[in-house]
Amino acid sequence: MSATTTLSVSGHRTTGQSVRTQNVMAAVSIANIVKSSLGPVGLDKMLVDDVGDVTITNDGATILKLLEVEHPAAKVLVELADLQDQEVGDGTTSVVIVAAELLKNADELVKQKIHPTSIISGYRLACKEAVKYINEHLAIGVDELGRDCLVNASKTAMSSKIIGSESDFFSNMVVDAVNAIKVADGAGGFKYPIKAVNVLKAHGKSTRESVLIHGYALNCTVASQSMVKRITQARIACLDFNLMKAKMKLGVQVLVEDPEKLEAIRKRESDITMERIQKILSAGANVVLTTGGIDDLCMKYFIEAGAMAVRRCKKPDLKRIAKATGALFISSLANLEGEESFDAAMLGSAEEVVQDRVCDEELILIKNPKARTAASIILRGANDFMVDEMERSIHDALCVVKRVLESKSVVPGGGCVEAALSIYLENFATSISSREQLAIAEFARSLLVIPKTLAVNAAQDSTDLVAKLRAYHNSSQTKPEHAALKWFGLDLYEGKIRDNKAAGVFEPTISKVKSLKFATEAAITILRIDDLIKITEEKKDQRHPHDELED
């Protein structure tokens, strides 16, 4: 039963089944956009925005972010992909596809006169059981696999991306970069702040000429060619203001009666900045990084002091450098008394700061910072589109390696987890004697969309492959002597079933668990909606100002 009525307020109200069907259609159409980009042989999308900027990408979250979706229910899926990107970094496409499939199957149940509340409680129960099963039966501890496990997890994340063919080279680079930035969290474990890996892009040369640098690379050069290019035992000041000749603020008027006083004002203007620089240098600073500009007059003082000054640095870069070197990021020299001062405690330190030519560009490298280690990756590629997509791929791989190191467990990929859960939940559904049984069975069926889509994208016979995969997992769960079959998943290049644990196709356990939870929550959110009230925009008076004058 559905109806559309006009409200007493200016707007329309749509209720009942039609709202749910509309929402499901919107969600499915969003999923269909990203469906063909799933898996190691997924295709890329080219997105052109209103200004004509082109983005070529395979990343689900990026595709959906650039789509500018209008439909309110479809926006839930866009936010879902963004959430998965922030939380895990990978699995953005699959989470949207699973959520849309859950909705589609729930809509079928509603049409068979099953109340949405029963479906919701069934989905919640199925999700809980699925997570429990993953953790108990499918998760593999990282400690028993070692470094190869990290490299393989990184390769799996890259397999669907543009750098999939060079995954050996990049995976080792990513694992080295993540290991270089580990920080003790004080509770006996380690944290891996991904933002400490600075990814720089430079087009030209081949992708294999990308390099990993130990230290923080800054895409700037020294302010003057007369300055020193290398400083050892560096003491670094990070500033967020201009080091230029002080000028009177706009609107300040100075009446000068004696022309000689004019010269004194000009001298004082230049002295103000000179005093600031002297305070910074006398505190022991020999490297000054600022987000503002440095004029010629001020450069002279740095050159005479034998210090290195770098201007127009990006604020996020400086904040990371301040964190890595132990410096304070200072936006003003004023202290609590209103006077200007600069203390040696505000300086950070690093073993060496050097201007180096990497590839075709001059970069400032900050090596072995005191407080935290840092790493930088410089990517090379044929053109901007390629380098941008490489950056997104490297970000995904960095996030995956971080998650594996922090959660210390992985699961086999290639549709293995989904097929195992599908069989397990179907058997579990038959043990439930309430209405939720149907919802749990639909949840189990929905999960098969991942292996099906993987097979379709690889130009293989999806029906045949998924049937074989289910048979393998069924015997692994029913016959104790076949327990090893639970690691089997799809080999999409050969078009057959293989042991993905032995083949080294791994994903972080947390990625699968969170994508299941997020997809279920998103499906439930949309499923609960049975009423849509749309307020129509007020029409403003379109009269021209000239007409009013004539009146």
Image: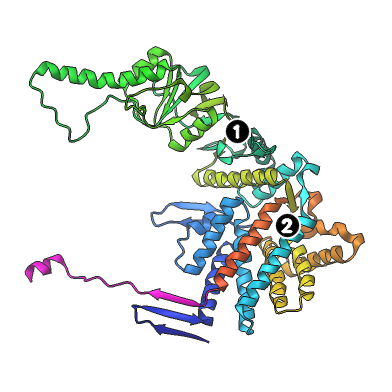
Q: Nearer the viewer, residue 285 or 95?
A: 285
Where in the figure is residue 548, as x and y percent of width and height?
11, 69
Q: Earlier in the sequence, mark 2 or mark 1?
A: 1
Classify residue 9 as left or right of residue 532.
Answer: left
Reply yes or no: does residue 329 show up in magenta. Answer: no
Looking at the image, which residue sits at the far right?
481
Where in the figure is residue 151, as x and y percent of width and height?
71, 42
Q: Is residue 518 above or below residue 224?
A: below
* Dot 1 amino acid type: Val
Q: Is residue 426 above or below residue 323?
A: below
Q: Nearer the viewer, residue 511 or 169?
A: 511
Where in the figure is residue 478, as x and y percent of width and height?
87, 66
Classify residue 503 as left or right of residue 528.
Answer: right
Which mark identifies residue 211?
Answer: 1
Q: Are marks 2 and 1 in contact (CB under 8 Å)?
A: no
The reply to whether residue 208 is in sight is: yes
Give SS at disc 1: strand
Q: Is residue 528 above or below residue 412?
A: below
The reply to whether residue 40 is in sight is: no
Q: Nearer the viewer, residue 224 or 145?
A: 145
Classify residue 344 as left or right of residue 459.
Answer: left
Looking at the image, which residue sits at the far front?
337
* Dot 2 amino acid type: Gly
Looking at the image, which residue sits at the far bottom?
1
Magenta residues, start to end:
529-551
**CA distance for labels 2 and 1:** 30 Å
Q: Which residue is mark 2?
A: 414
Residue drawn 58% across and 45% down? 395
Where in the figure is residue 368, as x and y percent of width and height?
58, 25
Residue drawn 89% across and 60% down? 482
Query: Depth-wise, is mark 2 or mark 1 nearer the camera?
Result: 2
Which mark identifies residue 40?
Answer: none
